[in-house]
Image (tube, grey):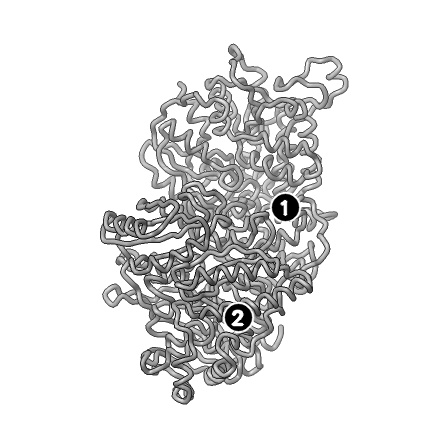
Amino acid sequence: MTDLEAALRRAVRGEVGFDVTSRALTTMDASNYRRVPLGVVAPRDADDVAAVLEVCRERGVPVVARGGGTSIAGQATGTGVVLDFTRHMNRLVGIDPQARTAVVQPGLVLDRLQDAAAPHGLRFGPDPSTHSRCTLGGMIGNNSCGSHSVAWGTTADSVRELSVVTARGRRLRLGQDWAGAPQGLRELVDGDLARLRTGFPDLPRRISGYALDALLPENGADVARSFCGSEGTLGVLTEAVVRLVESPRARALAVLGYADEAGAAEAAAGLLPLGPLTVEGMAVDLVPSTEGLPRGGAWLFVETGGATEGEARARAEAVVRAADVVDALVVTDPAGQRTLWRIREDASGTATRMPDGSEAWPGWEDCAVPPARLGGYLRDFRRLLTAHGLRGTPYGHFGDGCIHVRIDFDLLTDAGVARFRRFSEELADVVVAHGGSLSGEHGDGQARAELLPRMYGAETVALFERAKAVWDPDDLLNPGMLVRPAPLDTNLRFSVLPREPVDVAFGYPSDGGDFSAAVRRCVGVAKCRTTSVSGTGVMCPSFRATGDEQHSTRGRARLLHEMLAGELVTDGWRSTEVRDALDLCLSCKGCRSDCPVEVDMATYKAEFLHHHYEGRRRPAAHYAMGWLPVWLRWAARTRTAPVVNALASVGPLAAVAKRLGGIAGEREVPRLAGETFSRWWRGRRRGPAGDGDLVVLWPDTFTEHLSPSVGRAAVRVLEAAGLRVALPPTLRGRAVVGDGTSRSALALLTARRGRVCCGLTYVSTGQLDRARTVMRRTLDLMAPVLETSAPVVVLEPSCAAALRTDLPELLHDDPRAARLASRVLTFAEALERHAPDWTPPAVNVPAVGQTHCHQHAVLGDAADRRLRESAGLTGELSGGCCGLAGNFGFESGHYEVSAACAEDQLLPAVREAPDGAVVLADGFSCRTQLEQLAGVRGRHLAEVLAEGLE
């Protein structure tokens, strides 16, 4: 233990982490930069903060305050001690509806404040797109803004008082009329009044530099306002009194379509006199689908408010009339507005990829110019991009003249980094020429601080340095930010990654086969750190259950990044730190769809486990549950299911078996079916064959051995819809599609018997060599099916997702894999596409439950929604993950997290179900979790419809 670590442990009551994992999780924020800290402290209160500063000051160790870690300029990274306020100092201390103020701690997430203020008809004005995970401390440090700044201003406009601890341990209460000003600050201002009155651009989004002009007498000598945007360089915030604003009772959203972004930009300033709440802009390049948007190549999102829906709509329609648009849409339905706003908010992640899938990076993320000059600035910006051979798609707060953009900088080569520097210097001059600010929202950090002399001049920057010395004479707090900055092209996080491709099993088709590029996908916007899901969202259930960064998608990606870097995590694929962080990943695949940049942690986990255990003995659960298809087929062939069930019901025997198999003692072993689905299929009495399309019904392991009732129900419904149902061949060689046997003598002599399997259990446990063997055998068996046009209907969502994605990505060298993947349909998709004229039975009951996480992430549930609606199954299914997640919830040590995940969405939805509601759960894991934790029987949609046929 180092002297510093020991001293901190003696001095503070909060957690002190100098271990590899704690440090690796905080090497980066959402910027291009990376710094390795000495350690991380999670203070419990202001006393802990003061103690940390005293210990570090005595040893000359820098201190960096960190909130949600979503800063885009590098200011939330450092080489000393990082203060993590999200763990303990995250409370809403109080709210005063009459005074319209709230008292908050720095680690409080913005959405939690909004939730508390909403019942009083109030809200905090600024709302960055990261509102579900950014903290008030980070917002004050960066002077964050968000989409509503045209109505309610920046964070500085919403701050009343700030409690801070200075680097030398003084506790100050900052406010107006010089309240809390450190000694020497007033003298500094009085000595340079002329410069402060003339040297700062007058525009709504001037975030760059120190806001020393807020200290002018005519501005109220507001020390709290001046502190905002100082990026943790002047003092450490421990509490804040913030102003709340009245939230409109009703809102309407006018989406205005323009031919291009320049047209939208030039129109934005003209809408401001109408008093909108937002004037946001984005172009078609950032929109995955234009469905639901009005015609155009770019859009303005203009929100209006009112006391009633009619008043809000009238104001929105007035905006439409005043705007010269190609097309327009006015939405008053709150759900419809949320859907449209998600398109805009996800741009912060979507923008990290160009339309062709290539990478794009921050660095010039948020320049701002006077709104009336935005159109001209964008034209000059585009010309500069072209001159440097770069690409980027601007979007952002057009009404405030603030533009966000990610640019396809090459930050991996010396030549690319040199071009990054040249472009940055030239763009800074363009911004200044338009009267703008280098930063209009996210702060200067390392990305822009070096260029502040171009904006303010050397004398004003020297004044910034003197102000820093007044507050922090030892340069202890976040050194290298704002004053005496590190060069903008150093400390780049990509420089430590390997230059040669890493040898991996999966194909990573979206990343050119490069695992490093796949890991680089995580840019740190941290949507995975949200504490609640909206709609059918899933990501990230383990973070919501634990609240621990290492169990978020971002945290795991950071550890993988450090594993590839080899500086902190030094043992590569054998790393225990990475293994432990991935241990609580449910492989729910939620990040594959919910993450704006489509990080696929389930695949990365499988890849890691494959290498981590290569040539070594695996955990018992990998053999017990990874090889589940083998054990279940063995029980079926020997017809010992009744014996297995009987033994599993004997407590002591079951306990021993679970211990040997690495299964959680709290779990019950599911009962095996007395008759497998395939055996029922072979023995059933078939009616006359229909004349509809042929569909091949996939007998997945769970339907085959554990819930054959689902398969029987599906057959009944599919045949009732007029479809001809067949099963895959069981012989490799010359086989007849779908009869489950082969009566050809030659085939019997030359073929090998087998059963199709998607390989899911082997993939989820990282046994990728075995998975490939199983998948290739499956492709051999499916060869006759692939010669037809028949779709493959898969009832188990996790198996369908494995066939759609894992199969072609793991067997990327076998063209048959992609062909089979393209044939896979869900139960609802098969009915919709191949029996479009069939009308399902009118069940007419409410439905509750949860959309399977793999269905949400990979397959989509639009067809299921339409089928449920057609059958009269009313109500919305919840999001999240059931928490069992295949082998995850059965593994020893996972039970508590598994149960917590179920309590997040699924179990509350079931408890609140109306009388007579049917509980829908298409996944075997979901049904098992419901049965074991709630004593409720979940039903596959096929079962509900089959019963309706009666």
User: Relative to 823, is 769 above or below?
Assistant: below
Of the pair 296 and 10, the residue shown nearer to us: 296
In this image, 751 relative to 899: left or right? Answer: right
In this image, 575 relative to 467: left or right? Answer: right
Query: Mark 1 falls on what kind of element?
Result: helix
Locate residue 75, reporting x and y percent: 52, 69
Query: Mark 2 falls on what kind of element?
Result: helix
Q: CA distance from mark 1 to mark 2?
A: 48 Å
Of the pair 872 and 646, the residue shown nearer to us: 872
The 10 Å Cα crowd at callout 2, few under 14, some 14 to 19, many 20 or more, is some
- The residue under the point 52% across, 10% down is 688
User: Relative to 880, is 776 above or below?
Assistant: above
Residue marked by disc 1:
606
Which of marks 2 and 1 precedes in the sequence?
Answer: 2
In this image, 436 relative to 695: left or right? Answer: left
Q: Nearer the viewer, mark 1 or mark 2?
A: 2
Numbered mark located on residue 436 in the image:
none
In this image, 552 relative to 322: left or right? Answer: right
Location of the C terminus by quadrant is top left
Locate residue 71, reporting x and y percent: 50, 64
Location of the N terminus by quadrant is bottom right
Residue marked by disc 2:
429
The 10 Å Cα crowd at callout 1, few under 14, some 14 to 19, many 20 or more, is many
Q: Amino acid at mark 2?
A: Asp
Locate residue 217, reporting x and y percent: 33, 83
User: Relative to 16, is 350 above or below?
Assistant: above
- The residue under the point 72% across, 21% down is 733
- Can residue 896 be seen in this snapshot? no
Locate residue 244, reporting x and y percent: 30, 64
User: Relative to 217, is 555 above or below?
Assistant: above
- Residue 784: quarter of image: top right
